[in-house]
Amino acid sequence: MKNPNIVKAAALTLGTLVALLSFSGQALGQVPDDPFVILLKGIYQPVVHGPNLGLSQVNLSDGSYSTTNIYRVSGLPGNTGNPVGNFYARFDFSLRPLCAYQLPGGAMTMEFTGGGFDAPIPDGEGGVYLPGTFELTILEGTGIYQSFAGGHNHMVDLLHLLADGRADEYCFCNISRP
């Protein structure tokens, strides 16, 4: 007769192994694909007390940042229907053009280095669409994004400036390592 305690221990070990293997790469600290694509989407909100993301080049609590949601498109674990992080940007163009990405497993600071918006397109309701493309350099990364420092982000943006003054973002970010 087999020892029932050994059978229970083996079953528990096997169950734990199966559970660990079924977790998403995010839970296990898997590095994102290179490149990966995310979507910045939603109405920007001012940041009053920003989180400390462990990034040395941005102070998200200095009153100059606004935030919107980040959604997964490809290359990151998780669901595409729910926000996976937060994007922080400055709309005061007299300041250094920095932004921050708070993502599962870490964060990144980036700097706008080129690109711009095309001619505004009226939305028929008193606002305008601003289509554009931007190039960004990844200055630093924490957690699973450390290897992206020195890399590149190509943004394809359709910013909607609403008649009431709010900004509604819809922007794809193609992020790659150096």
Image (spheres, grey):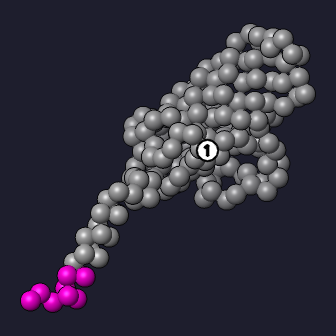
**What residue do we see at 82% from left, 52% from top?**
48
| Residue 51 rendering spot, x and y as whole percentages | 70, 57
**How would you rate the neighbour count of disc 1 (Cα within 10 Å): few for under 14, some for 14-19, many for 20 or more?**
some
- In this rendered view, identify the residue nearer to me: 60 or 38: 38
- Is residue 93 positioned above or below 11 on the image? above
Q: Is residue 178 visible?
A: no
- In this rendered view, identify the residue nearer to me: 95 or 20: 20
Instruction: Determine the image quadrant of residue 49.
Output: bottom right
Instruction: Determine the image quadrant of residue 2.
Output: bottom left
Instruction: Determine the image quadrant of residue 167.
Output: top right
Q: Quadrant of the C terminus?
A: top left
Circle 1 residue: 83
Please tell me whether residue 139 belongs to the stretch shown in magenta.
no
| Residue 44 rendering spot, x and y as whole percentages | 77, 38
Residue 85 lies left or right of residue 164; in this view the side is: left
- In this rendered view, identify the residue nearer to me: 34 or 126: 126
Residue 3 lies left or right of residue 148; in this view the side is: left
- Is residue 89 positioned above or below 145 on the image? above
- Is residue 117 positioned above or below 152 on the image? above
SS at mark 1?
strand
Q: Farthest residue to the front: give it.
A: 1
**What residue do we see at 67% from left, 59% from top?**
52
The amino acid at mark 1 is: Pro
Question: From which residue to which does the magenta span run?
Answer: 1-9
Principal SS element in the magenta part? helix
| Residue 108 rendering spot, x and y as whole percentages | 56, 46
**What residue do we see at 71% from left, 30% from top?**
169
- Is residue 47 positioned above or below 3 on the image? above
- In this rendered view, identify the residue nearer to me: 24 or 148: 24
**What residue do we see at 25% from left, 75% from top?**
11
